[in-house]
Image: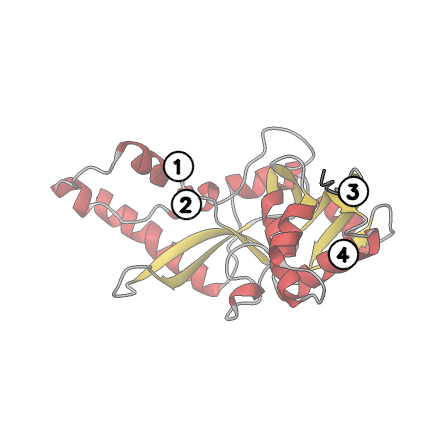
Amino acid sequence: MEMTLVKKVETAEVTIQPLKRARIKLRIIGSTPMFQNRMASKAKFQLLTGGQKKGKADRAAIKHDPLTEFRDSAEILPGGPTALGLRVVAVKAAMATAALETPGLTKSSAQRLLFMPGDHVPLYGVPQLRMDIVRSADINRTPDVRTRCYLPRWGAEVEINFIVPQLSMQGVVSLLCNAGILVGIGDFRQEKGKGAFGSFRVLGEGEDDEEWSDLVENHGRASQEAALADPEYADRDTEDLMAHFFAEVQRRAA
């Protein structure tokens, strides 16, 4: 009778270590001014219900309403220490983009390993109304006038959750610093190459800083609501355009 030897196969047990999440609070302070450019309510309504064909009266109306567009471009918070908010997803996106220039970390890894709780954090800084000549996204790159919320000085405190040991606390701080230098936040930011707006520096929680203290004390909700109601113009070009706008409104109303 023939016997068959069966070789015993040893299997190694796979041990999966549970991931741990750490947390850090950091402050970012603008080193260059920032533009906010939230999608206007009118544009959102048109996306929802579709646009209507303009009649003769609509075509004769003034194309832009700068004051409304200025207020619509701002991220408004219903309560808290500030009237303006900063979308935390913009900070995470800046850090993920900065990972492209950070050895040992990929953009997709940064997106998975970083968590930013909530939608907005309070944004300090008194907004100004600024108008710029821009190029539209159509095939002819048609010039147009864009009115945006412009903050010459700004700052915010963000909470960042991250996975350890893949990321360390010092690594997260360094990545946010790199994002402030290489990427920035808001329109016309450093990431795009042409502009240099929205760049920032990083402070640790509780770290003494005169500029941060001044922003919290003098650039909160009361100052922001006053500026939204009666804005200061950011530059001479904006002053000239607004003077022409008001003159044209009066002329057409006569």
Q: Which residue is mark 4?
A: 202
Q: CA distance from mark 3 to mark 2?
A: 75 Å
Q: Earlier in the sequence, mark 3 or mark 2?
A: 3
- Give the secondary structure at mark 2: helix
Point out the tag, 1 or 2, that comes first from the N-terminus: 1
Q: Secondary structure at mark 1?
A: helix
The quarter of the image holding the C terminus is top left
Mark 4 vs mark 2: which is more N-terminal?
2
Residue identifier under label 1: 41
> Residue at 72% of width from left, 64% of height from top?
104
**179 on left or right of 38:** right
Q: Considering only vertical position in the picture, is 177 above or below 7? A: below
Q: Mark 2 packing: few (<14 Cα in 10 Å), some, or many (20+)? A: many
Residue that label 2 marks: 69
Mark toward the viewer: 1 or 3:
3
Identified by mark 3, the residue type is: Lys
Say if mark 1 contacts mark 3, CB within 8 Å.
Answer: no
Residue farthest along the left direction in this orientation: 56
Answer few, some or many: residues within 10 Å of disc 1's Cα (few below 14, many 20 plus, some between 14 and 19). few
> In the rendered structure, which disc, 1 or 4, sits on the residue that comes first in sequence?
1
Query: Identity of the amino acid at label 1?
Result: Ser
In space, the residues marked 4 and 2 are separated at their CA atoms by 31 Å
Q: What residue do we see at 39% from left, 37% from top?
A: 41
* Residue furthest to the top: 79
Of helix, strand and loop, which one carries label 4? strand
Residue 243 vs 61, above or below: the answer is below
Per the rendering, the mark at residue 8 is: 3
Q: From the viewer's perspective, is the residue at label 4 or at label 3 nearer?
A: 3
Earlier-in-chain disc, 1 versus 3: 3
Q: CA gap, disc 4 to disc 3?
A: 59 Å
